[in-house]
Structures are given as C-alpha cells and as structure tokens.
Amino acid sequence: MDDNSFFLATETEIKKAKTTDVYFLRTEKVLKKEKKDHKVFIEVTASSIKGSDWGIFAGVEDVLDLLIGLDIDVYTMPEGSLFQKEDENGVKVPTIVIVGNYLNFGRFETPLLGFICSKSGMVTKTARIRLAAKNKSVLSFGARRAHPAITPVVSYCAYIGGCDGVSCILGAEKLGISPTGTIPHSLIILFQDQVTAWKAFDTHIPKQVPRIALIDTYYDEKIEAIMAAKAIPDLSGVRLDTPSSRRGNFKSIIQEVRWELDHRGYNNVKIFISGGLGEEDVHEYVDIVDGFGIGSEISAAPPIDFALDIVALIGENEDWKPVAKRGKFSGRKNVLRCEKCLKIEVTAWNIKEGLCEKCNNPLKPILVKQLENGKRIHEKRSIEEIRQYIQTQIKQIRK
Ligand SMILES: [Zn+2]
C-alpha cells in the first residue's frame, strides 16, 4: 500500500498551503512581478450560521499551527467562544484578525477557512444538542459517518461542544478519555440469541464498562428490555436503535419500555436512544430518556461559512486606510463582548471598553493576540478548559 492510497492531504502539504485555491498563488505571482505588496489588516467573519443565531468559534490551534513562523500578528477569539454573526448595528463580527504584509500569508486563506468553517460548524451543532439534552447524556457515535481521516477531529469537536463521551478509539485517545460504546447488532446476530449475546458480553468485558443492552434486534423493544433486565444483574441501561421503518410512534415505544421496566422494579435501568437522531429529536425525547447517541448530526454538521477580507491597508502616506469590497464594512475593528449576556459589539480598533446597553455590564475585548511576529505568546489551553468555557457560555444564554 503506498502512502497516497487514501488520496489525503498530509499535514506537511497543508502547512505548505498545497491545499489552497490556485488563484492565491497566481495572485502572489502577479504581486511579486509588479513589486506590489501592502501591510494589510484582515478580518475573518461569518456570513451565515445555519440553523442558529449564535455560533461557537473553533479551530484556533489549527490556524496558529498553520500561521506560526510567518512575519505577521494574529488575533483570535479564544477557542470555544460563543459569538453572533453580526452585532446590533449589522456589523459582521471579526473572529480572527491578521496584521501583516499580504504576501506573507495570503496563500493560507483556504486552509485557514477550512479549519474554522468545519470545526466551528460541528462544535456549534454539538453545543445546541447539549443545550437541548439538558442534563441527559450525549455520546458521539458519528465516526462511521465521516471520513476516517477526520474522525479524531469529529471527536474533538463533539467533546468540547459538550458530548459526555465519544465512541471512536483514536478520538478518545487523543482527548485523553476512555472511549464509550454499547453493543452492535452484529454481536447479537452472531449468537442468534439476544440473551446469550448479552451474557457473553457481561462475562468477558471488564466490569467498569457499563452494561447497556441493545434491545431492538429481533423482538419488540418492550419484550427485549425485560429479557435484558432479567438476564444481566447489574444492567445499567438499554439502547433502542430502532430503524425508522419500525418506529411508528417512537415516543410511545420509549414510554412503554419505561413503564414495563419500572413496573418490574428495574427503575435503575436507563434508556438510551440512537439511530439518525437530530437536534429536534433531542428536544422531543429529552424528558423520557436518559441519553442519546448522536451520529451524522454532529459529524456532518453544516460548516459555518467564514470569509476572510482585507478591511484596511497601509497606503502611500503610511496611514491605515479603510478599504473593503461591496457588502463589507471597512476599517480596523475591535470586538467587545458583555461577559454577562454575551452580546457582542464591534467597535473601532482603538476602542477597548464599553458598557452593555442591555445589562449595564462592562464590555471586554474578546480578540486575543496569539502570534506576535509569528511567535506564540500564549500557552495552549487544555481541552477540559475549553470544554468548560463552552459549557459556561451556553448556560449563560439558556438563562
Ligand atoms: Zn450584557
């Protein structure tokens, strides 16, 4: 097998901007031939966030790894920041600012946007599911719905966005957590009998792995739930992965399973559901189940469409000159955010403070200088810190 059999870009190729759009290299060539370059101020803003009036910004570390060593200054919102697409005056909110000569970084536009569009989309969707799921468990089962090369990225996004666990082994390993999962249908089919399969699992799998029986393989969920509860003494839960062709009224099926388990004294047996579930399903079933397995709703979440624009440049007279294409607000901008209600206000670059009109709370700058002349000036934050930061913010907007 040669190294290119999966048709993938390597990290080296990404860092060399080999995945970029060809027009950036042509632009570079023209600018170099004409000896034309400017110190520019660029901003990265979201033009749309599908299905949400807020987003969670993610992909900062990738962007910094991509741009490190270039002679530029880079400011970003911290990883996991909750933001709105635009402020109340309709000004698009910069999530990244780069200051430097265009030729020093222009070719990196495509991979830079790719990192943040994709990751922010997945983290935002996960955070919305986390909110909808209240205090119930949410697990990321989406590895099978994404290209395997990016499954650890899916795991990262799912975990910082608020999933309690991920099923992908490599994703969990990179996150420093234990992978989480139940039982596939194959195990039951191979034994040709649910009870024998559950018991075999119980015999051979370490005790710290919760016993969660899959109960939709052969019979009605109610029947299999009772069989599982009787067969496995410390059964932790049952999982309904009922195919949509057999669901009928899924809510009724779940309620019936709950009733029958409780009626026989199995009140501690939890109910988990999975199988093509989306954010809407989480809203619908949250009060009658204990947890959700979520797949493509996270791993194939719509990207957030970020765009990169030059909004100011140093002209002939050595002053910053506001410039912008149609539809974009020109000039160097700063971003302030109310730490209480998370409302964002875009201001001129030199304005570093303000007051939230809504809650009279001070507004604080949220763009952090991350690279100075290409050198990192902050430590990486830990995954748990980022995850906690996101959870704190989504609790603030729930209020
Ligand atoms: Zn406020």
Image (cartoon, rainbow, N blue to C red):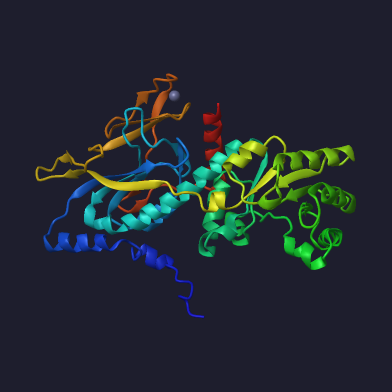
From where the camera sits, is residue 39 visible?
Answer: yes
Quarter of the render that holds ligand 1: top left
Image location (x, y in percent) of residue 291: 69, 43
Residue sticking out furthest to the bottom: 1
| Quadrant in which the C terminus appears | top right
Residue sticking out furthest to the left: 317
Q: Left or right of 168: which side holds 114?
A: left
Q: Left or right of 197: which side holds 54?
A: left
- Residue 384 sits above or below residue 142 on the image: above
Image location (x, y in percent) of residue 381: 50, 47
**Residue visible at 40% across and 56% down in the picture:** 65
- Give the quadrant of residue 142: bottom right
Q: Nearer the viewer, residue 338 or 182?
A: 182
- Residue 312 sits above or below residue 25 on the image: above
- Give the quadrant of residue 362: top left
Q: Left or right of 328: which side holds 202?
A: right
**Residue visible at 46% across and 47% down in the picture:** 120
**Residue visible at 54% across and 39% down in the picture:** 128
Image location (x, y in percent) of residue 17: 33, 63
From where the camera sits, is residue 388 visible?
Answer: no
Image location (x, y in percent) of residue 94: 34, 40
Q: How many marks?
A: 0
